[in-house]
């Protein structure tokens, strides 16, 4: 587990690439996309939303996902769609509400809630990522 390898300050200064369970990541993004379709903000659909829609339709072997944790539940996500002779990318902030809800329930002594069965971004970060050397967004 990555959290056992680094302190919080060390971990937050590095980028990690999601190398396993990309389907789970895409499911999370798809759920969020559907939410924003049902409850659109003013600028909907934004270029970022369109990118995330495309991302969920792209085969997992043609995407790269990079995560940088900067708070208890906050992540900077940088995603790339690899195309035949180029790549498209976008970055956004993700607040892991599922992990936050788990934490709140644990503090109340509740451990049998369905939220513990939902895959969240923190699960993927802790179990399916590797540290990236010298990652720079371009």
Image (cartoon, helix red, strand yellow):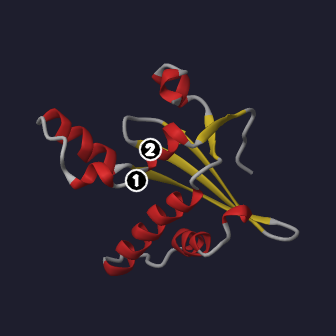
Q: Residue at x 56, y 53 (%)?
A: 21
Question: Up-down: is 14 above or below 68?
Answer: above
Identify the residue at image location x=47%, y=65%. 27
Seen at 59% across and 71% down, the residue is 51
Counting labels gives 2
- Nearest the camera: 43 or 5? 5
What is the CA distance from the residue labelled 2 to the residue labelled 1?
6 Å
Which residue is located at x 45 percent, y 49 percent?
121
Identify the disc placed on residue 119: 1
Query: Can you tell which quarter of the image residue 22 is in?
Result: bottom right
Residue picked out by circle 2: 123
Label 2 close to label 1 by CB (< 8 Å): yes
Query: Vertical placement of 105 versus 94: above or below?
Result: above
In x, y percent, where is residue 16? 62, 39
Q: Judging from the image, what secondary structure is the residue with disc 2 in?
A: helix
Label 2 crowd bin: few (<14), some (14–19), many (20+), radius 10 Å = some
């Amino acid at each position: 587990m990555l959290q056992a390898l680094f302190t919080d300050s060390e971990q937050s200064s590095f980028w990690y690439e999601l190398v396993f369970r990309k389907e789970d990541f895409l499911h999370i993004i798809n759920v969020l996309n559907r939410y924003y379709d049902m409850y659109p903000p003013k600028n909907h659909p934004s270029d970022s939303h369109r990118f995330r829609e495309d991302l969920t339709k792209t085969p997992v072997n043609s995407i790269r996902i990079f995560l940088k944790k900067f708070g208890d539940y906050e992540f900077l996500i940088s995603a790339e769609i690899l195309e035949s002779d180029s790549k498209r990318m976008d970055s956004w902030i993700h607040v892991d509400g599922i992990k936050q809800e788990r934490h709140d329930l644990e503090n109340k002594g509740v451990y049998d809630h369905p939220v513990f069965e939902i895959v969240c971004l923190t699960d993927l970060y802790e179990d399916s990522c590797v540290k990236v050397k010298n990652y720079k967004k371009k």
